[in-house]
Image (cartoon, coloured by chain):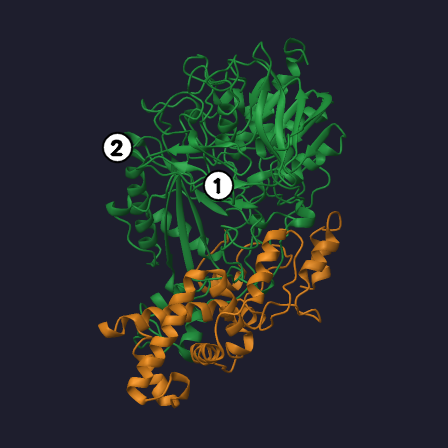
Chain colours: A orange, B green
Amino acid sequence: MDRRKSIKILGLTTVGTGLLLESCQQGGSDKQTAEATADEIKKLPGVQAFEAERNNQLNSERFFDDHEMSTITLLADIIIPKDEFSESASKAGVPAFIEFMVKDIPEYKLPMRGGLKWLDIQCLKRNSKVFIDCDEKQQLSMLDEIAYPLKAKPEMQQGVAFFSLMRNLTASGFFTSEIGVKDIGYVGNRPQLWEGVPADVLQQYGFTENT
Amino acid sequence: MKTIEIQEQEQIYDAIIVGSGAGGGMAGYVLAKAGLKVLMLEAGPFFDPAKDALQLRWPWESPRRGASTIRPFGDFDAAYGGWQLDGEPYSTAEGTDFQWFRARMLGGRTNHWGRISLRMGPDDFQPTDGVTDAWPITYDEVKPFYDKVDRMIGVYGTVEGIRNEPDGIFLKPPKPRLNELFIKQGAKKAGVTVIAGRGSVLTEALPGVEGRGTCFYCGQCGRSCKVYADFSSSSCLVIPAMKTNNLKVVDNAMVREVLTNSDGLATGVSYVDTTNLQEYSVKGKLVILGASACESARLLLNSKSQAHPGGLANSSGLVGRYLHDSTGSSMSGFLPQLMERKRYNEDGTGSVHIYSPWWLDNKKLNFPRGYHIEYGGGLHMPSYGFLDWVPNVNGKVPDKNGAKKERGGYGVSLKNDYRRFYGANVGMAGRGTALAHKDNYCEIDPNKVDKFGIPVLRFNYKWGKEEVAQAKHMQETFQEVMHQMGAIVTSPTYGPETSYGLEAPGKIIHEGGTVRMGDDPKTSVLNKWCQSHDCKNLFVVDAGPFVQQGDKNLTWTILALSMRTAEHILEQRSKLNI
C-alpha cells in the first residue's frame, strides 16, 4: 500500500502526521548512517546529549590497526559473501560497525584483538603466512576448523570462541544495514492496518480462521 | 566554603506531586482538571513522545544498531535510565539481590512499558490462599475506577468472564500473528488457556477522547508513540493536564526531603535542580508521592524531623518493608514449520496480541497464587543480536535438500540459514505473584549518598521457596507448550542451579509494597485512601501502597488507585483544609 494512502486510511491526519512522514523516509539523499565513516553521528531528536557525546567520542577513537581491519574485512566477507540476492558484509559497512562495537562494548576488545592474533599465529605455523596472505584454500581450511563448534578439536576452542563472536558481529552488522534489512525481507516499520495473518498464509499452514 | 542558598518560593500550591509516572500523572490530571493548583516535580527531563520518540527509526540510525549498551532495552527504547544510573547508586545487603530500574523523564517508565493492562481480580484483593495478606479494599470498590481508566485511557481485549481476570471496557484486540496461532494450538493441547491480549493501545478511536491518534501497527510501543496511540503518562495525562494551566511541571528536579512543621504536617518539599545544583524549597497544602515504590520510600525515610524521628509516615517502622516484584522466567525456541516463511508486515501492536491468564487451581500445587504467560516471536524489525541464535541451531534441522547440516558455518550457506530461520522464533515468559514479605525490604544505606548528597537505598531481598516453585512450574509448562506446537527449544535448560531461570528481584520492574495500605496504623503505612496514618496531608500514589500484587502487571491498578485517591482528596478538601 502506498504510504500516503495508508496514512489517510488510518486516519492519522490529526496528530503528528508530519513527524511520521519524516520518520518514514527511508534512504533518500540524506544517507548519514554510522557506516564506514568517521563523520559525526547525527543526533536524533530524543537522544540525550550524553548519549550523542559518547557516540561521537567513540567514533573519533580508533581501535583496530590497518592489518586488523583488513583481516576483519576479509573474515566478514567470508562469513557473509555477496550472492545472487545481495551484497557482501563489507559493502554493507560491517567492518566499520565492528570497529564501533568493540569500543561501545569494551569487553569485546580483547577477544577480538587476541582472536585475530591467534588466527594469524595459527596460519603462520601452518603456512608461514598471516591469514590475509594465505591463499583461499588455506584460509577456508583454517576456518573449517573453528567455524563448526561441535566438530572442532579441543585445541581449536579459542578459535571457535573468536569466530562465534566475529560471526555474530558480522550478522548483526549486515542484517541491520539497509542492504541487510532488505535482504532479510523485513517489510514493516511503516503505518499499516493489521487485520491478521493473510488468507494465503493461513491456508498454507492449515488454519481455517485467523483468531 | 560558599554558603548554599536555598531558594524558597512563596506560592503555596494546593498540591505538590513528586513524580510524573502513572501514579503521579493520574493524580496531577484529576486534581488539575478539578481546578487545583498543582506543582509536579520530575527528577528527569521533559519528554514528549510526539517529538522525542525514536519510533519509526531504522536500525542503521543507531551506531550500535539498537544494542542495549546505553539503554537497557536498546538504543531506540524510550526509557532514559536503567538499572544503573551514573552518580545515583544503591546497594544490596550481603547475600541478597535487587535490581532497581529507574527512568528519569517526564512520564517515567510509562513511556517504554509493555502496555499490558490487567485488572487485579477479587481474589487478588481478598486472597483465599491462607498465605498472602488481604487488602483493606475489595475489587468491587476499585472496579468503578478501573472502568473509568478504561474509558479515559483505553484498553483492548475480549470479554471472557474469567472470575479472577476481570473484564474491562474493551477496544477491539489485534488479531494473532502466525506464530501466535501455533502457540494457541500448542497451549490448548497442553491444557493452557490462551485469550486475546489486553493492552492500552487505541486500536480504534476512544469515544470522548481528543488529541490522540489510533494505532498504525508499527509494534514499537516501547519507543513511545508519536501520535499518542498508546498510554504514556506524559502524552495522556501530564501534557493534557498542563493545558488546563493548573498544573506546572518542573523537570530535572530531584526531591531531597518532604518538609514538615512542628505538628508533623507536610508543608512542602525541598529539591535540587539536577542541571545546575541549585537548591529550592516549595510549599504545598498537600504532598503526593508518585516517585515509584522504592524512590517514595527513600524520600520518606530521608525526611526525618522531630515529629517523625524514624522518617516521615514511619511510626509503624514499615516504610520500605514488604517490597515485592513479580517473578519471571522464560523460554525461547523456534518452529521448524515456520522456516522460509512468506514475508509480510506483522509488526502489530507493541503490546501483547495474546496471553495466558492464570488457569490452574492452586490446591494441587506447592505454591500460592499464580502467573500469566506472555508470548513473542515473529518477523520483527532487525536489531543488534537478533540472529545470534541461528548458528547455534542450524544443525538441528536438515537443509533445503534434506541433508544434515553441521551447526555453525559461514558463507552463502550460512547467509541462507539466517534468511531461512528469520521469523521462525518463538518465546514465552511467565510473570507471577511474588510474595510480599516483611523481611524483603529497602532501607537507607548508613554509609552512602548519591551525587546530590542524598542518602541512598540498600536492598535486602531474597526469593523464597514459593517463587522458586513457581518458576519450576513455568519451565515445565513452557516445555509442554513448546512440545505440543512442535517447537525446538533454543534457550538453556534452567534447573535448580538457576532456580529454574527465575530472574533476580527487580528485573521484571513491577516493584511495589513499600508503603502498604491497611486499616491498622501499626501494621500499615497508609490507610485505604493511600493517605499516611501519621501525616494526614501526605499521600502515595505509585505501587508503594500495594499490599500484595497479583500476577497482573501493576500499571492499571496504579492508575485506578491514584484516580481513586485524587477523587477522595477532592471530596475531602474541606476536612483536609485545602
Under circle 1, the secondary element is: loop
Name the residue: 30% across, 50% down: B480
Inspect the image, locate mark 2, and give the three-letter code of the amino acid beneath it: Lys
Residue, disc 2: B364
| Quarter of the image where one finds residue B327 | top left
Q: Does any portion of residue B391 appear in the rendered image?
A: yes
Percent across and percent down for residue B237 are: 66, 34
Looking at the picture, does residue B20 appear above or below residue B313? below
Q: Quadrant of the N terminus of chain B?
A: top right
Looking at the picture, does residue B254 appear above or below residue B524? below
Name the residue: 56% across, 21% down: B539
Marks 1, 2 in one chain = yes
Q: Does any portion of residue A152 appear in the rendered image?
A: no
Residue, disc 1: B101
Inspect the image, locate mark 1, and give the three-letter code of the amino acid beneath it: Phe
Looking at the picture, does residue B68 appear above or below residue B194? below
Under circle 2, the secondary element is: helix
Residue B366's mark?
A: none
